[in-house]
Image (cartoon, helix red, strand yellow):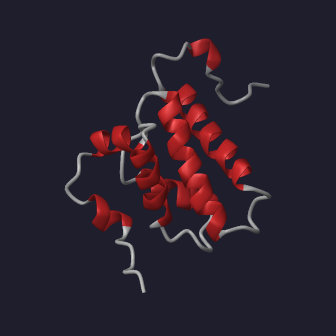
Amino acid sequence: SPSPSPSPSAATVGLNKKKLGEWLGEPDDRNVEVLFNYARTYAFEGVGFERAFRMYLSRFELPGESQKIDRIMEAFAAAFYDQNPSTFSSADVVHVLAFSAIMLNTDAHNDAVPKVRRRGPPTC
């Protein structure tokens, strides 16, 4: 029988979070395989989307390149959906939600985003 996977915290202890995020986002076959296997080490079963998403993102920093972020969100979506198939209609839905949450967060909190694109609470 295969040995159990290490927990995400054990698998990343002592690693530089920024470098880990950059490496996980690389498109090379080996990196992608490690990324998807890493995402599967999380215990997402029965965990809500927001909590699972925060757990996943707490172990590394997202890279700045949107293609790398997309790949990392795709791995999260696959792992989350596999463990919670009745929560969303497909892994693609989880992927779009996760990527959209990152983009909205970036728009809301990044000083490089023009203030015109940021929206505050509605005014009456």
64 vs 1: above or below: above
> What residue is rendered at 46% in x and 37% in y?
27
Q: Residue furthest left?
A: 14
Quadrant assignment for the C terminus: top right
- Residue 55 visible in the snapshot: no
Q: Total label count?
A: 0
Viewer-proximal residue among 92 and 18: 92
93 vs 27: above or below: below
Viewer-proximal residue among 114 and 14: 14
> What residue is rendered at 40% in x and 46% in y?
31
Q: Is residue 72 left or right of residue 8?
A: right
Quadrant assignment for the N terminus: bottom left
98 vs 34: above or below: above
Tell me residue 38's x, y (percent): 43, 59
> What residue is rendered at 59% in x and 56% in y?
50
Viewer-proximal residue among 110 and 79: 79
Tell me residue 120's x, y (percent): 64, 26
Quadrant hosting residue 46: bottom right
Q: Is residue 90 left or right of residue 4?
A: right
Tell me residue 30's x, y (percent): 40, 48
> What residue is rendered at 32% in x and 64% in y?
9
Quadrant hosting residue 6: bottom left
- Residue 67 visible in the snapshot: yes
Q: Is residue 30 left or right of residue 106?
A: left
Tell me residue 84's x, y (percent): 67, 68
